[in-house]
Image: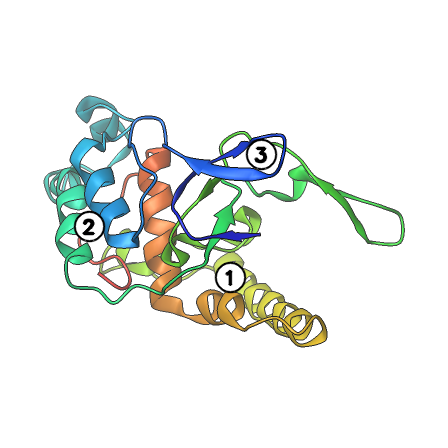
Amino acid sequence: MRFHMIGCITDTGNGYSVGPIPGIGGPFETSADFFVQWAAGAAFPLEKHKVQQITPSEHFGEVWNSIVNFPSQVAKFAESYNFRKGPLPVIHGYLYRSNILMSGDCNVDAIIDWEDAIVAPWELVEFIKDLRVVPPAMNGPSYQESLSACQKRDKQRTYVKYVRETEEKQLLDSTLSLVLSNSAVQDFAHAFWLWHEGKSGFYRNSGIM
């Protein structure tokens, strides 16, 4: 499902419409408008002392500054970035394997927990949460990717392969597979949603920003 406006989905009884997002507003005609408005009211979920407790002391100042400045960086980035045009995708918000109900023959029967779903920019589409890898830049310059992260990246490539095959079989455009295979877009999407979840890290260079 794709729509031409960014916002929350409402069932009208005769179909679906896109309305305002609580705490942000809208609906928005462009991705840039959405990001600018989001940045104006964005609030990090954790207070400063909580972030300090989970961040190495030698990095806390830089990490906290990057967290605080992330919304303004997003707003500035939105003024010049060439976003993908609509129609725009529905983003589930909590797409974990536990929210996908499957039959014994591995067919998807249903996806549950849609209450936080929104129509959003293509640049916020990410892999299923179980395959998400924290962007290397968020972990700092000394970060070395773990075996688990490498394995997830292998699974991501397989995931994209199946998406491409489905696009071809169903005569769909290739936007979804292109977005998922773009590492810079994925790093930005992961960073954006991780910021919402209160993840501590270096947000100064997040993917396409």
Amino acid beneath label 2: Val
Residue 156 vertical position relative to residue 104 in the rendered view, above or below: below
Residue wearing tag 2: 74
The percent coordinates of residue 28 (x first, y second) are: 31, 44
The crowd level at tag 3 (other Cα within 10 Å; few <14, some 14-19, many 20+) is few
Q: Neighbour class for label 2 at 10 Å: few (<14), some, many (≥20)?
A: some
Q: Which residue occupies 19% across, 50% down?
A: 74
In the rendered image of this protein, does residue 178 appear above or below residue 137? below
Q: Which of marks 2 and 3 is nearer the N terminus?
A: 2
- What amino acid is at disc 1? Leu
Q: Which of 187 and 33 is in front in this view?
A: 33
3 or 1: tag closer to the N-terminus:
3
Between 4 and 195, the residue placed more toward the observer is 4
Q: Could you tell me which quadrant the C terminus lies in?
A: bottom left
Judging from the image, what secondary structure is the residue with disc 1 in? helix
Residue in view at x 66 percent, y 77 percent:
168
Q: Establish if 184 lies above or below 44.
A: below
Q: Residue at x 37, y 43 (%)?
A: 193
In what element is the residue under mark 2?
helix
Which residue corresponds to mark 3?
A: 114
Label 3 residue SS: loop
Along the viewing direction, whichever of 207 and 140 lies nearer the viewer: 207
Identity of the amino acid at label 3?
A: Trp
Q: Name the residue under label 1.
A: 147
Which marked residue is nearer to the observer: mark 3 or mark 1? 3
